[in-house]
Amino acid sequence: MGGRIVCVVGPTACGKTTLGVALAKRYGGEVVSADSMQIYRGLTIGTAAPTGAEMDGVPHHMVAVADPAERWSAARYAQEAIPVTDGILAREKLPILVGGTGLWLDAVVRGHGFAPGAAGGEVRRRLQERLDREGIEPLLAELRQVDRPAAERLHPSDGKRILRALEVFWETGKTITAHNAETRNLPPRYDAVWIGLQFADREDMKALIDRRVDAMVEQGLLEEVRSLLERGLPRDATCMQAIGYKEFLGVLEGTRTEAEAIAEVKLRSRQYAKRQLTWLRRNPDIHWIYWEKKRDFAKALRISTEILSAAGVF
């Protein structure tokens, strides 16, 4: 197991950035963003990327490091974030991973990599063509023949993961189920202390998400989407499918009104927060801090300090 790190996690709008910065200032740390959309340059408002003022002099890594036309996976993120984390440790600083993209966080902390296979390569292209031509059922039947546990685990609508499982098998001769079983019992790369933020009452979380969306609109989310298009970003780019960008793209294309887009962004953001919590609650190592009506960061910092002290962090 490698060095000691801290992970600050939780659903969207729960205050991860603020607490991460506060902990970094107290412990001499540096922040590593673990947000699947903050990696893209030019996506600032809609991703709530930390501003210079919010960073408050604390070094932040893995923010605005990718071209918006790129498509990053959890494996690609881990490939880039692990050397960054190791570098922080080498400088005898405390890495603080901050984000709500659970798969990406797990990829770094576990650090064992993903099943081999050139995602986006020739095998994937042929599988995608078959999916477009034949539909998912023949591919799922094929997966059932070579990797029944994976076929039974995956929902028929999850075409992306069905293609990935077939891709791994046809490129490596080993099933993705076998790969996952081999890595599951390996020790994690890092000794992580997990701190989670969430609201005690989900209605308070929903209200805060709605206010955040309103603030993004006031800050110029529509203009940010227009700017990305004017720079030549394809409409079907991965980042343009992100919550906020997809809906306001519709406004520019005339398929929905701004009011309709705002309502849709609020709904999808609340649904996303629920999915984030579902993923994170699987992790029994997270020390949860529950907000009441308002976020009390002084209290959260005090509780976090107690958690880290008990874990032997400085």
Image: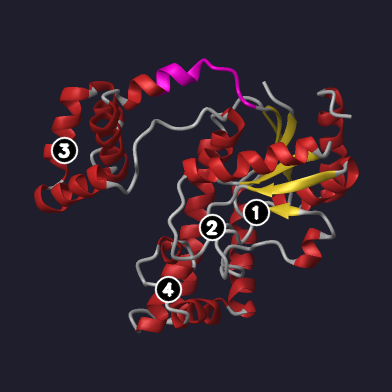
Q: Which mark is residue 37?
A: 2
Range covered by the magenta-colored residues? 180-189
Question: Which quadrant of the rendered structure holds the N terminus?
Answer: top right
* Residue 33 image offset from top left, x and y in percent: 65, 50
At a point 30% along the width and 45% down the height, the residue shown is 160
Identify which residue, 116 or 36, lies in the foreground. 116
Dot 4: within a 10 Å radius of its alpha carbon, few (fewer than 14), some, or many (20 or more) residues?
Answer: some
The disc labelled 2 sits on which kind of residue? Met
Per the image, is 184 magenta?
yes
Dot 1: within a 10 Å radius of its alpha carbon, few (fewer than 14), some, or many (20 or more) residues?
Answer: some
Task: Please identify, in this view, whether the residue under mark 4 or under mark 1 is nearer the observer.
Answer: 4
Residue denoted by label 3: 139
Of mark 2 and mark 4, the one earlier in the sequence is: 2
Task: Please identify, in this view, whether the residue under mark 2 or under mark 1 is nearer the observer.
Answer: 2
Per the image, is 127 magenta?
no
Q: Are marks 3 and 1 in contact (CB under 8 Å)?
A: no
Q: Compute the Cα span from label 4 to label 1.
A: 36 Å
Determine which quarter of the picture holds residue 246. bottom left
Task: Please identify, in this view, whether the residue under mark 3 or under mark 1 is nearer the observer.
Answer: 3
Of mark 3 and mark 2, the one earlier in the sequence is: 2
Q: Does residue 56 appear anywhere in the picture?
A: yes
Residue denoted by label 1: 204
Give the answer, above or below, for where 37 lies relative to 148. Answer: below
Q: Secondary structure at mark 2?
A: loop
